[in-house]
Amino acid sequence: MQDEIWTVLPQRYPLLLLDKVLSVDSGRSVKAIKNVSVNEYCYEGIGSDACLDDFAYPWSLVIESFAQAAGILLYDLWGERMTSRNYVIMFGAFNNIDFGKSAVPGDVLEHNIQLVKGLDDCVILSGTTTAGNEMVVDVDRIIAVIRSNTILGVSGMVSS
Amino acid sequence: MTLQCNRKRQRNYAKPLYCIDAVLDVGPNNITIKKMLSANEELFKGHYPHHPVFPGIFLFETIQQAVVHHGDNFHGRVRPVRIKKMRFFHPLKPGDSFLCTCSMSDPSEGKMIIVHGKCHVNDTVIAKAEIVFRIEE
């Protein structure tokens, strides 16, 4: 299913943060993993005096990885609009995202995601990310939207 | 094996996560920072290849780094515990620059700080968030 990641998700290096899809229950849930490696871009430049805390995988990238795993689920809804240059996928809102243990290199982030509601231009997602058996991130609600490029005006302001 | 670390300050963020270009104002309960977006930034290569958009999650990262910077000056190490809510209103593209303004509550008995963060371009709000941080020992 690795091919699926490349064909379904529009993100590329250095922001393609998903390695393997374990299972998909179409329209309902997805299970996918991201391996955290010390060779990743975000660890560049960490000095020789670094300690384990310095290698805590950034929370923002954990959430981005979670959302990309959800993207696998959204292909059934949004189809080729997802990789089209005429559309862009964006976050709409977060509600109650809890942070647990920090992931570090060597950890495998496992995303378990449920599609709470799927609409033509908007979805509500819920789920957890774990490393081993420990909770890394617990997501109550993430709302994501897909929008046509044409609404993005000059300077990135939405013009309508 | 656990590595020990006695340094008080948190690490400087590595690429592609630099989110603070300038600290404009910092006080006991507030901080304002500026971030400029250049087409040269590596992250735009992958987000997205044909259509660069600043990742919304990096607005959370910006608020977090601002609060960490504020913590370095006033409280010590801080880490996020919960995003209570965050709303995204407008996308940003290369060439834009925005300010991130955060106001912090005084630490509670549990050493929790509630942060109200807002990313804005002039009067236009790009995103706003309410995030709980904890002061680490």
Image (cartoon, coloured by chain):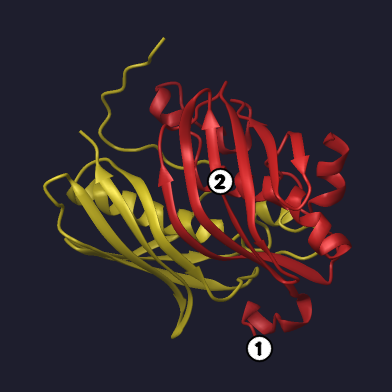
Q: Position of residue B17 (x, y in %)?
A: 53, 48
Q: In the rendered structure, which amino acid carries the disc numbered 1?
A: Ser
> Which residue was labeled with disc 1?
A159
Chain ID, yellow in image: B
The residue lying toward the viewer, choosing from B80 and A111, is A111
Mark 2 → mark 1, Cα distance in angstroms:
33 Å
Residue under label 2: A127
Tell me which numbered mark, 2 or 1, is placed earlier along the sequence: 2
- Residue name at image x 57 percent, y 34 percent: A44
In the image, is B12 to the left or to the right of B16? left
Pick whichever, A151 or A40, lies toward us: A151
Any part of residue A15 in sight: no
Task: Specify whether A51 is left or right of A125.
Answer: left
Where on the picture, by quarter, is residue A35?
A: top right
Rendered red, the chain in question is A
Residue A29 coordinates in the image, percent (x, y): 69, 46
Count of numbered badges drawn on the protein: 2
